[in-house]
Amino acid sequence: MSDEQLELPEVPLVHAPIRMPRENHIGEQVFYEKWLELMAQPVPFWDDEHPEPMLHSVLGHHRKSVFGQREATIGATFAVWLGCNAGQSIVYEGRQHRKHLLKSADCYLLSWASANRRFTWLNGGARMVEYMLAPDDHFGPIFPYGRGLARIPDLTADDVEAMDQLFGWLGTDDGEAWLVECEAAVQSRQAAAYRAEQRETDDFLRTA
């Protein structure tokens, strides 16, 4: 194989986040499920034998040309996090940016950059990307805030860039379409859960 040829991963990647979606958290569950569906889709004009074409397409502007398990983990973590309140706040702010930007594709990336800024007085001085990618054993008591990120993870420049690229992709037509699909699925599942809860309540009242 020449130096110019692409050296591809030999084993399939596992698209599992650092922390799985929380039980009964519909947003996190739906976004993760939709991410798994996205990662399984083919990419037009890509070689059918190319492993993980969608991950390479989403992270296509990253300085690396071949992605491995670390990038797959970061992508899945990004998806789960988008389904929580913190992720949804960035989506909301990104859409506010889009209303006023000529280059609207940068809307979510701008919102992410603002949220990811380090403040010594916020979250124990940890950046959002550090919270997202920290292993469980990095969390513990922090003075005077209670429990939080007690130890900053050793992230690489490639880790941070992967997250930047993901938010950049979110502002593309494909990224926005995926986001809208996720949001519609969340609303549908939340409505179904609400109806089921109401039926249980009504059944209980009838038999009480």
Image (cartoon, rainbow, N blue to C red):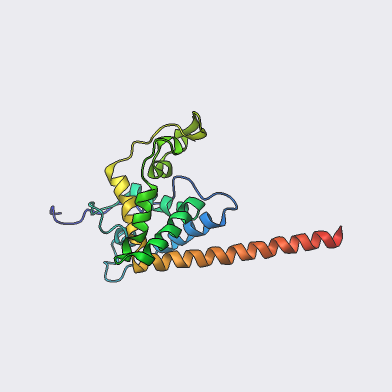
Q: Front-most of 208 and 123? A: 123
Which quadrant of the rendered structure holds the C terminus? bottom right
Residue 15 position, x and y percent, is: 41, 53
Residue 35: % across, % down: 43, 59
The residue at the far front in this view is: 100
Residue at 40% x, 38% y: name it: 126
Tell me the quarter of the image containing the N terminus: bottom left
Which residue extends farthest right?
208
Camera sees residue 15: no
Name the one closer to the observer, 198 or 7: 198
Is residue 106 shown to the viewer in this render?
A: yes
Q: Nearer the viewer, residue 3 or 73?
A: 73
State the residue in front, 1 or 52: 52
> Residue most toward the bottom?
44
> Residue at point 27% right, 59% down?
60
Q: Is residue 58 above or below residue 128?
A: below
Q: Quadrant of residue 55 in the image?
A: bottom left
Q: Is residue 181 left or right of residue 102?
A: right
**Residue beneath the point at 51% across and 33% down:** 145
Residue 89 on image: x %, y %: 47, 55
Residue 192 image-quadrant placement: bottom right
Left or right, residue 29 beside residue 122: right
Q: Position of residue 64 (x, y in %)?
A: 23, 51
